Image: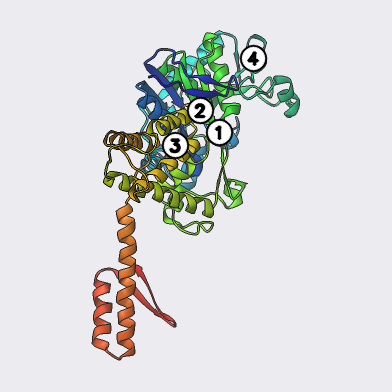
């Protein structure tokens, strides 16, 4: 582990040298999806960001325990303390068991993460599998005086907590502003203060997902699961907690408060947050009509897409921006990413076929050094990729006889590209061949149909029918149109 990795800590708001609490072990917790809908771009970004971190730490020789949870209970609409549970709502609308919804979308999530070549975490715990532990933590917080019961629900007492600890440190908010910015309570509210949040909610009669407790039959608050599962699998103190920037407040702020209310200590050493994705400059949202699922990207079915984009194109595109910057999806940008990635993989093929000379006409260790510097600088993948492209230029000049490479450098360069492109960036040369053969198939069908067209013009019905029938047998559906023909595969 000779590399010195700097990561930006959202809590201290500066880059810090990464020093694990208990090297070579590293505990990494990342907030996973709430599984009530199809995976979309918003899921791809944190998954890819922390996949790079997981891969790089592993490359450096750390033994990483990577926990990424599945939220299957307690996440209410609008991330609030009131409203319907997102899973239960979907179950009601689709007339399914809540756990059917959870299983279905968990499977979908896994399928698409695999397509994006995101490695599976070491542990993937579910909130509903940790109700007992969540109840235990509520008892601890109650015992320490930072929570109160109200009508069968338990709320975290943020005002009291703020007297002993600082609430709002991660998101840079202060409690007075928060109180003055929220509605005043009307006396009907179960909370003592508008800033308080639910640890346990008494279930309304129509609420399906419910568990018994001494307070009421109910369900845990959304923020509690991550406090509990982080502590259970990574210990009271662990190294890195990640998630999307939108989770900083209230989710992560509440998580910190819950943990501090239990043991009085900051539980996480480094907080990391990835920035958001916009589409053509706009925030992604169902109501804006720009909510594109990963399936739609892959089959190109969304009206905003000019063509399908492969999962690797999406991955490469996301990696071309630093994880703390926003990423703006547009067709032009995706097409540029697609071309760039092809250029990189073509150069890797060229690299395999290069012939070595007596000595190198360039400095390979300089390129290697720069690649490490980039990734060590808070996982700066766009800079890393630009250095890899500097190498691509050299590879192409060697091929053209304008530069040379020594035997040992050639071996080292192959190793360098393997390490960075495949192991760390997690890119896969995806069916370049299938893509090429797909294009070839298309051209061949067009060619045959043009021959058929000509045969028809020559009144050679036998040939024309033969081409049509044989293509039909192969699953090609031909439609004759005014201007010629159209075809599609069955
Ligand atoms: Zn979480």
Tell me if residue 390 comes above or below residue 335 in the rendering: above
Place of residue 166 in the rendered image (x, y in percent of width and height, measured from the top left): 64, 14
Q: Identify the residue at image location x=50%, y=17%.
A: 268
In whole angstroms, how far apart are the C-alphas of marks 4 and 3?
Answer: 32 Å
Which quadrant would residue 194 be assigned to in this image? top right
Q: Name the residue beneath numbered marker 1.
A: 324
Answer yes or no: disc 2 within 8 Å of ligand 1: no
Q: Judge by depth and name the residue closer to the eye, 383 or 7.
A: 383
In whole angstroms, how far apart are the C-alphas of marks 1 and 2?
Answer: 9 Å
In whole angstroms, how far apart are the C-alphas of marks 1 and 3?
Answer: 13 Å
Which comes before the other along the chain, label 4 or label 1?
Answer: 4
Q: Name the residue beneath numbered marker 2.
A: 378
- What element does badge 2 sit on? loop
Q: Closer to us: mark 4 or mark 3? A: 3
Q: Name the residue beneath numbered marker 4.
A: 166
Which comes before the other along the chain, label 4 or label 2?
Answer: 4
Place of residue 356 in the rendered image (x, y in percent of width and height, measured from the top left): 27, 41
In whole angstroms, how far apart are the C-alphas of marks 4 and 2?
Answer: 27 Å
Task: Classify 10 Å Cα crowding around label 3: few (below 14), some (14-19), many (20 and above).
Answer: many
Task: Classify 10 Å Cα crowding around label 4: few (below 14), some (14-19), many (20 and above).
Answer: some
Tag 1 near tag 2, CB within 8 Å: yes
Tag 4 near tag 3, CB within 8 Å: no
Q: Is residue 316 visible?
A: yes
Q: Residue furthest bottom?
A: 459
Q: Name the residue beneath numbered marker 3.
A: 48
Place of residue 109 in the rendered image (x, y in percent of width and height, measured from the top left): 41, 41
């Amino acid at each position: 582990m000779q590399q010195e990795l700097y990561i930006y800590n959202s809590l201290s708001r500066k880059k810090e040298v990464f020093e694990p609490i208990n090297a070579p072990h590293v505990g990494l917790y990342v907030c996973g999806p709430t599984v009530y809908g199809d995976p979309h771009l918003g899921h791809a970004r944190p998954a890819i960001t922390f996949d790079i971190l997981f891969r790089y730490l592993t490359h450096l020789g750390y033994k990483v325990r990577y926990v990424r949870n599945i939220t299957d209970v307690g996440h209410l609409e609008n991330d609030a303390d009131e409203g319907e549970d997102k899973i239960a709502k979907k179950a009601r609308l689709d007339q399914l068991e809540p756990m059917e919804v959870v299983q279905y979308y968990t499977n979908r999530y896994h399928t698409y993460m695999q397509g994006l070549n995101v490695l599976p975490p070491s542990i993937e715990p579910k909130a509903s599998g940790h109700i007992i532990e969540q109840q235990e933590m509520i008892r601890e917080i109650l015992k320490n005086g930072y929570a109160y019961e109200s009508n069968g629900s338990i709320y975290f007492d943020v005002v009291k907590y703020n007297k002993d600890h600082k609430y709002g440190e991660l998101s840079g908010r202060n409690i007075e502003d928060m109180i003055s910015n929220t509605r005043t309570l009307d006396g009907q509210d179960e909370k003592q203060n508008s800033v308080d949040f639910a640890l346990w909610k008494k279930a309304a009669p129509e609420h399906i997902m419910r568990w018994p407790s001494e307070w009421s039959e109910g369900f845990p608050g959304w923020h509690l699961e991550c406090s509990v599962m982080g502590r259970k699998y990574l210990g009271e103190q662990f190294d890195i907690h990640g998630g999307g920037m939108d989770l900083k407040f209230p989710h992560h702020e509440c998580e910190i408060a819950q943990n501090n209310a239990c043991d009085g200590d900051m539980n996480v050493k480094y907080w990391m947050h990835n920035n958001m994705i916009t589409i053509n400059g706009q925030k992604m949202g169902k109501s804006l009509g720009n909510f594109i699922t990963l399936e739609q990207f892959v089959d190109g079915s969304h009206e905003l897409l000019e063509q399908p984009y492969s999962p690797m194109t999406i991955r490469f595109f996301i990696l071309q921006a630093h994880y703390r910057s926003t990423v703006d999806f547009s067709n032009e940008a995706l097409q540029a990413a697609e071309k760039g990635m092809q250029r990189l993989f073509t150069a890797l093929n060229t690299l395999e076929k290069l012939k070595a000379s007596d000595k190198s006409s360039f400095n390979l260790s300089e390129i290697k050094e720069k690649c490490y510097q980039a990734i060590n600088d808070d996982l700066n993948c766009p800079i890393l990729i630009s250095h890899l492209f500097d190498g691509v230029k050299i590879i192409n000049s060697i091929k053209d006889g304008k530069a040379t490479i020594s035997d040992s450098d050639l071996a080292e360069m192959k190793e360098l590209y393997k390490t960075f492109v495949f192991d760390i960036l997690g890119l896969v040369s995806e069916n370049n061949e299938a893509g090429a053969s797909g294009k070839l198939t298309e051209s061949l069908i067009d060619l045959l149909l043009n021959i058929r067209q000509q045969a028809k013009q020559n009144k050679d019905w036998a040939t024309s029918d033969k081409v049509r029938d044989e293509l039909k047998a192969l699953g090609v559906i031909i439609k004759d149109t005014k201007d010629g023909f159209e075809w599609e595969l069955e």
